[in-house]
Amino acid sequence: MENIEKKYSIFRAFCKPITDLTDNCLSFLRICLSAAFILTVLALVFGQPYGCTTPSFQDQTFCSNNLLVYIIYIVFKLFLISVFLRTWYDAVYLQKNINISYFKLNLFRFLKLFAIFVFFIFLNLMPILSVSLLLIRVPNPDFRIELVYFSVVSIGLFIPFVLLRFYTNLAEYLEDLPFKNFGEVASKTRFKLSKIFFSFSIILAFCLFLFLTVNNALKVYTFKPFFLYNIIAEFFFELTVLILSILIINFIRVQKESFE
């Protein structure tokens, strides 16, 4: 336990995800720029470009309001992001050669990661679902039923905090290693939840700051022709999303290294 205490560092947990990005600029340029371009094309084809987020610009570009189209777009986008994250991890941490044959040989692994990625997002959104269920409920006059309902629904509020201790298993999966069992992970991260939460909060705060900065800049600095602006704005927006995704996956890698 003493060895684990010495190895884990909040400063390292925040800085190393960023340095892993800056130290691999060539991989970043080769993988991230290509992925951002593909996501930009996808958004334009499905009528979900950046300009559609601003009401005054919606009449100047193709925007789709079809719910089914939007769902299909989100599914494709999440799949492409999961492919991107797998490719980034393989290139940077596992030193794999990324070429055409790499994508052909790893299609099944991409699909598996996509399923895990969606499940991971769903679990982290559980607090939103729990709060929604608590707000829309009709109070029951029987306090026992009300207490049971509140207790069960409130479990969702704590799921992300529990998951923080098990993010290392996602890195284990990306390295084709077996998942660590609950007891092993719980033992290695015992009394470390506050440190993990604090370091992850710093990363999320940094990501939020970067996202809001880019988003506000794209809305302020518009230009004509709007079609060209829409393409460039969408590209930089997708690039920002991918950078944030990299920081999160790099953070998970740091957790794996810290609790091995």
Image: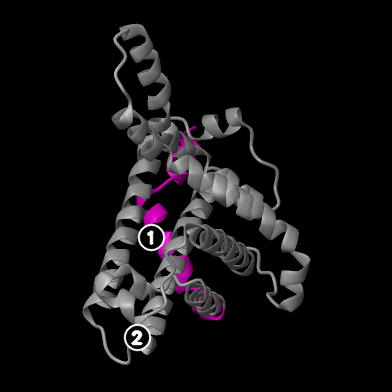
Q: How far from the left and from the top, in percent, is residue 122?
A: 49, 43
Residue shown at 31% from the left, 59% from the top: 208
Bin the neighbour count of mark 2 within 10 Å (Cα to Cα): few under 14, some 14-19, many 20 and up: some
Asked if residue 132 lies in the magenta stretch, the reply is no
- Give the mark nearest the N terminus, 2 or 1: 1
Which amino acid is tagged 1? Cys
Q: Which residues are magenta?
A: 1-30
* Residue 188 against residue 32 in the figure, above or below: above
Give me the C-alpha separation between circle 2 and circle 1: 34 Å
| 2 vs 1, front mark | 2
Res 60 quadrant in image: bottom left
Which amino acid is tagged 2? Tyr
In screen coordinates, is 145 left or right of 166? left
Q: Which residue is mark 1?
A: 15
* Residue 166 against residue 230 in the figure, above or below: above
Residue shown at 38% from the left, 87% from the top: 227
Asked if residue 10 lies in the magenta stretch, the reply is yes
Q: How far from the left and from the top, in percent, is residue 195?
A: 36, 41
Q: How far from the left and from the top, in percent, is residue 230?
A: 37, 82
Local SS, label 2: helix
Residue farthest along the bottom direction in this orientation = 225
Name the chief secondary structure element in magenta: helix
Q: Which residue is mark 2?
A: 229
Q: Looking at the picture, tell me which residue is in the foreground, 135 or 13.
A: 135
Q: How far from the left and from the top, in percent, is residue 94?
A: 65, 64
